[in-house]
Image (tube, rainbow, N blue to C red):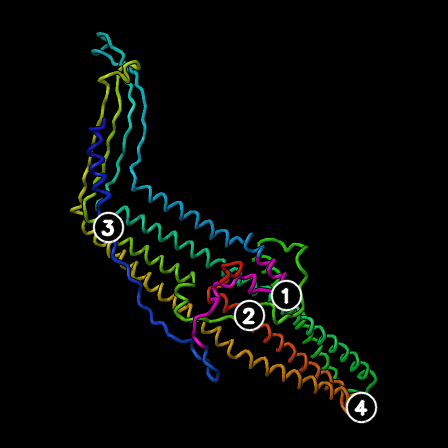
Amino acid sequence: MSKSLSPILALLVLALAGCTLIPEYHRPAVAVSSTWPKAPGHRETPARAAAVPAAEIGWREFFRDPRLQQLIELALTNNLDLRAAMLNVDQMRALYRVQRNALVPTVNIDANGTRQRIPFGFGGQGRGFTYSQYNVNLGVAAYELDLFGKVRSLKRQALETYFATEEAQRSAQITLVAEVGTAYLTERELTEQLAVARQTLKAARSNYDLIKRSYDAGVLSELDLNVAETQWQTARAAVAGYEQQLAQADNYLVLLVGCPLPDDLAPPRPFNPQICLSDIPAGLPSDLIARRPDILEAEHQLKAANANIGAARAAFLPTITLTGSGGTESTTLEGLFAPGSQAWNFSPQIVWPIFAAGTAWNELQAVKAARLIEVANYQKAIQTAFREVADSLAVRATVQTQLSANRALLKSEAQTYKLTEARFRRGVDSSLNVLTAQQACNNARQNLIQTEYSRLFNLINLYQALGGGWNEHTAQQ
């Protein structure tokens, strides 16, 4: 039997020594600026390497609110989108192993027995006889020799696809962490906005009741009453709108978490400007290519498409498959392993697609076009990443000015309301002017709340854009 297997072993050595036709991979050139864009009228963001890159800051260190940390932990356990991304990784890992196993022959053990009666003669004349056949074989069925690297090219393609799904899982987690943080901030902002809107509604209703009594006494006109009612109904509509948005924000948070919010969560805290890190380093623009998982995913997809070219090129060359077996064969069970019962067969096959060259050529052109598509997707992923970081840096550069202006505006409106109320008490001003001044003050307070949360939203967006949210804790440097 060893002599019968020697041709197979020789061909296996040739297969292992074969080359692949995968083109040499070169990372596509991308125009990357050495500095971050500068917002008009503001200082330029320095581009320098950070001691701890934003991508390596753990989300527990970035988000400091205990309730938010619990929500993120729940989401990472229960969110169905993240679970699907993790299962995609398991699926691609298994498919890669299937493709990798194609490099190794599949060896089967086959044992069977046959007993049949064969008639002798026709028309019922003569005597038949009973025939038995038993055999045990160890064989290889249709194993393709990878002389030109087709199987290895497909293996490399499966490996890069698997790596891409791993990066997609990282990207899904980073997105989920940022979405939970944003949804939680939205819920907290709407809670504060609703409280201010209810104060406005309470004041508008009190003013309407006062003017209604004055109108019934004949002191004020119907126009005054209509104006007061308009302000009251406007305030009612605003409260209803904030209640609706708050309910939707709660529902979205439950969806992200993947389960009803448990009762033992830490209680929500009032507005805290330090709910997350006050600032994070932007780092070097070139760091994005190595730290953004969506960019790495696009590059692995590009490498997979590059490996497909090797498989398509191999389609022009012969395909050699081997089928063989060796074992014992006998007409009786007793003689199955007796001397002289050895049997073997060896059946190599070569197929060269001479008249299918046109099909192979068009398939190669399609695979090359697919690679160019992945090049465009990779470059677009980098451009998108730079745009997201640049947008966040532009907001960071301008939001402090907005905060300063809105604080000054609130201070001014609060003083106006205070003076108008004093004039009303002295009988110099009307209650309508007092209500108008109070509404302006509340509007300024709502604008300030919105701007304060906008700064936090932008910090989360910048954290996500720089690739942060994958690590739970910041690694010790």
* Residue 358: x %, y % from top left: 19, 52
C-alpha span from label 2 to label 3: 50 Å
> Image point 60% across, 53% down: which residue?
259
Q: Which residue is drawn at 49% across and 65% down?
A: 464
Please report contact status of discs 1 and 3: CB closer than 8 Å, yes or no.
no
**Label 4 sits on residue:** 427
SS for dot 2: helix
Q: Three-letter amino acid code at disc 2?
A: Phe
Q: Which residue is drawn at 39% across and 58% down?
A: 297
Name the side, left or right, on which 281 lies relative to 336.
right
Please state which of the two labelled residues, at mark 4 or mark 2, is closer to the viewer.
2
Picture coordinates of residue 289, whole percent (x, y): 39, 65
Point out the frontmost of discs 2 and 3.
3
Q: How many angstroms separate mark 1 from mark 4 (CA)? A: 40 Å
114 and 152: which one is in front? Answer: 152
Q: What element carries label 1?
A: helix
Magenta-tinted stretch = 46-72
Q: Does the magenta stretch include residue 58?
A: yes
Could you say where residue 433 lies in the image, as x and y percent from the top left?
Answer: 72, 86
Badge 2 is on which residue?
457
The Cα atoms of the two marked residues, 2 and 1, are separated by: 17 Å
Which residue occupies the foreground of this view, 25 or 304?
Answer: 25
